[in-house]
Image (cartoon, grey):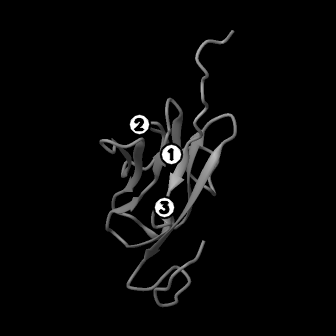
């Protein structure tokens, strides 16, 4: 007898803008809103890099301008984990991953495009990327 039935609630990502465009030198905010996170941990990483930028609220990024902002959304099972990049540069452009550490890792991909002089990294005028 296991007592009361324990229901396993799976965390899920809520919709956010997944194509972020920022001007060089500004602050980029990559949002990640999760429903039913429970005791699981959120990890931010840049897809092209081996090591995580953040694990929970701990920062591992060598870039001192990188931080994570965490808040619970009152009255809901939602938590927000935003990756903040200050003084963003073209080298910050790329695909970022907001991951939930669970038995099976859940990942949300967010694309950051940093404009220098009003143009994207390919020299074209600003455009939208679709994921």
Asked where in the image residue 108 lies, by quadrant, the reply is: bottom right
Q: Secondary structure at mark 3?
A: loop
Residue that mark 1 sits on: 53
| Crowd rating for badge 3 (residues with CA inside 10 Å; few <14, some 14–19, many 20+) | few
State the mark number for residue 15: 3
Residue at horizontal 61 percent and vertical 12 percent from the top? 3
Q: Estimate the spatial distance between the alpha carbons at disc 2 and disc 1, rounded to whole Å.
A: 10 Å
| Crowd rating for badge 1 (residues with CA inside 10 Å; few <14, some 14–19, many 20+) | many
Q: Secondary structure at mark 2?
A: loop
Image location of residue 110, percent across then percent down: 53, 62
Front position in the image: 2 or 51: 2
Q: Estimate the spatial distance between the alpha carbons at disc 1 and disc 3, rounded to whole Å.
A: 22 Å
Image location of residue 122, percent across then percent down: 56, 83
N-term mark: 3 or 2? 3
From the image, state whether disc 3 or disc 2 is nearer to you: 3
Residue at horizontal 59 percent and vertical 40 percent from the top? 10
Residue at horizontal 56 percent and vertical 42 percent from the top? 11
- In the image, residue 40 sits, relative to residue 27, either above or below, namely above
N-term mark: 1 or 3? 3
Residue at horizontal 48 percent and vertical 40 percent from the top? 60
Position of the C terminus, as image quadrant, is bottom right
Residue that mark 2 sits on: 57
State the mark number for residue 116: none
In this picture, residue 106 sits left or right of residue 79: right
Image location of residue 107, percent across then percent down: 61, 51
């Amino acid at each position: 007898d296991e007592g009361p039935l324990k229901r396993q609630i799976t965390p899920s990502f809520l919709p956010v803008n997944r194509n972020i465009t920022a001007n060089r030198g500004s602050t980029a905010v990559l949002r990640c809103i999760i429903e039913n996170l429970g005791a699981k941990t959120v990890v931010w990483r840049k897809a092209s890099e081996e090591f995580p930028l953040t694990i929970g609220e701990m920062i591992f990024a060598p870039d001192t301008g990188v931080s994570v902002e965490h808040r619970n959304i009152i009255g809901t099972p939602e938590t927000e984990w935003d990756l903040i990049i200050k003084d963003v540069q073209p080298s910050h452009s790329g695909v970022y991953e907001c991951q939930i550490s669970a038995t099976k890792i859940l990942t949300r991909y967010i694309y950051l495009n940093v404009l220098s002089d009003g143009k994207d990294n390919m020299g074209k005028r600003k455009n939208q990327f679709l994921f």
